Amino acid sequence: MSRVRVGVNGYGTIGKRVAWAVMKQPDMELVGVVKTKPSWEALSAIARGIRLYVPEGKEELFESTGIKIAGTLQDLIQSVDVIVDATPAGIGAMYAGRYKEVGVKAVFQGGEKESVADVSFNALYTYETALGKASVRVVSCNTTGMLRVLYAFRKAGDIRSVRVTIVRRGADLKEVKKGPIEGLLLKPAKPPSHHADDVRSVAGHDLDIITYSIVAPTTLAHMHVMFVRFNGSVNREDVIRALEETPRVTLLRASLAYSTAEVRELARDFGRCGDIYEVVVWPESLWVRGDEAGIAYMVHQEAIVVPENIDAIRAVTGVVEDGTLSIRLTDESLGIGRWLP
Ligand code: NAD
C-alpha cells in the first residue's frame, strides 16, 4: 500500500516535532513543511533534508537569503493526503476553508476552537469517531495529559467529578518574548479555565470537571494535581494497575526524580532530545480514601501531542481502522514506553 503523504503547515515547536515523527513512520511520507520566514527554524528543516514550502508571495524573501524552496503552500496542500496545521493559535481557522476547498484532510492543534474541525481528538477516546473525517483537532497539551490520566481513573471506577489545579509553564524554551519571568499568575482568575471545556470536548460534555490554571515562570513542563470523586469506593491497587496499563502514561517513582527539571534531564540522558511523549505520573503522589483519589503528574508541553498527531493522520485517512493498533505502531516508532526501566 502506498504511504500517506503528509505536509506540515507551521514548522514551530509542535510542527517540527510532528514532522520528525512523520519521518519515522513506515506508512507515511513527509512531503514538506511550510515556513513563513527564512529563520533559524528554516535552517533546522534544511539540516534534516526537509523540503520547504512558503506562503504565496514569500518566494523572493527566501530565495534572496539563498534558501531553496520547493514550492508554495498551495503546491504543498495540493500534493498531500493530509495537512497537519501547526500554525499559532487561531491561524489554523484562517486556513481551514482553503484546506476544505482543495479537499485535503486537515489535522488542527489545540490552540484552535473546537468548531474548527469535525472531531476533537485523543487517540484513546475518539480514534474511531475520527475515522475518515475531513478534519480533526488534536486537543492541547494540558488537556491531553488530563485525558490520559482520566482514562486510567475511569478504568478504576465510575467517576462522579474531577477537580484539577494546573501549573502551566510560562513559555517554551525558544519563546524569548513570553513570560512571566517572576511570580505566579492566576489565569484566568475565575474558574474554570478553558481546559475543563477542552477535556469535555473529548471525554463527553456531561463530565463534571473544574480546572484552575496558574502560569509559572518555567519552560520545562506543566504539573497538575488532580482530585477525582467516584460513585463508590476505589482502591489504590486498581488505580495503579489502570495507570500502568494506559498507553502513554509512565510511572516514575518520586524517590528517583520528583521535579520537572530532573525528569526532562533524564529524558535527555535517554537520548530523546529531552522530549517526553508520555504523561509522567508519580505513584507516591496517589492518595486514595473511600470514594476519593488525588494524584500529581507532569506534562511535557512540547512533545505530548506529537503521538496524538500521528494517530490523527491515520484516523482521518483510515489507513489503520483500529485505534489500539495505531497507538502501538506510533509508540513503537517513537520508542514510547521504553525509556524508563
Ligand atoms: P510556534 O509559534 O512555535 O510555531 C508556529 C509556527 O507557525 C512558526 O514556525 C511560525 O513561523 C509559523 N506561522 C506563523 N504564522 C503562520 C502562517 N500565517 N502560515 C503558516 N505558518 C505560520 O507555535 P506552537 O507552540 O508550535 O503552537 C502551534 C499550535 O500547537 C497552537 O495551536 C498551539 O496552541 C498548539 N500547542 C502548542 C503547545 C506548546 O506547548 N507549544 C502544546 C500543545 C499544542
Image (tube, rainbow, N blue to C red):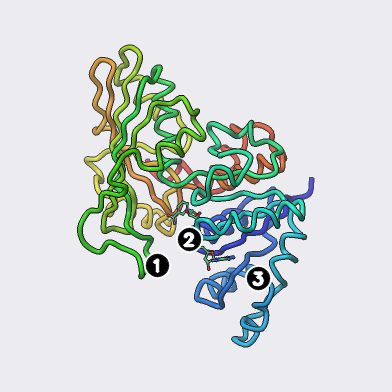
Residue 95 at x, y = what percent?
A: 64, 58
Q: Are there few (<14), some (14-19), or many (20+) residues within 10 Å of tag 1?
A: few
Q: Which residue is mark 1?
A: 174
Pointer 1 with pointer 2, Cβ within 8 A = yes
At mark 1, the secondary structure is: loop
Residue type pointed to by label 1? Lys
Q: Which residue is mark 3?
A: 55
Q: Which residue is mark 2?
A: 13
Task: Choose the circle earlier in sequence order: 3 or 2.
Answer: 2
The answer as to whether callout 3 falls within 8 Å of ligand 1 is yes
Can you tell which quarter of the image residue 163 is in? top left
Q: Which residue ends up furthest to the right in the rendered image?
A: 1
Q: Which quarter of the figure is the C terminus placed in?
A: top left
Q: Which residue ends up furthest to the top in the rendered image?
A: 232
Q: CA distance from mark 1 to mark 3?
A: 23 Å
Residue type pointed to by label 2? Thr
Can you tell which quarter of the image residue 297 is in? top left
The answer as to whether callout 2 falls within 8 Å of ligand 1 is yes
Q: CA distance from mark 1 to mark 2?
A: 9 Å
The answer as to whether callout 1 falls within 8 Å of ligand 1 is yes
Q: CA distance from mark 3 to mark 2?
A: 19 Å
Residue 296 at x, y = what percent?
A: 28, 37
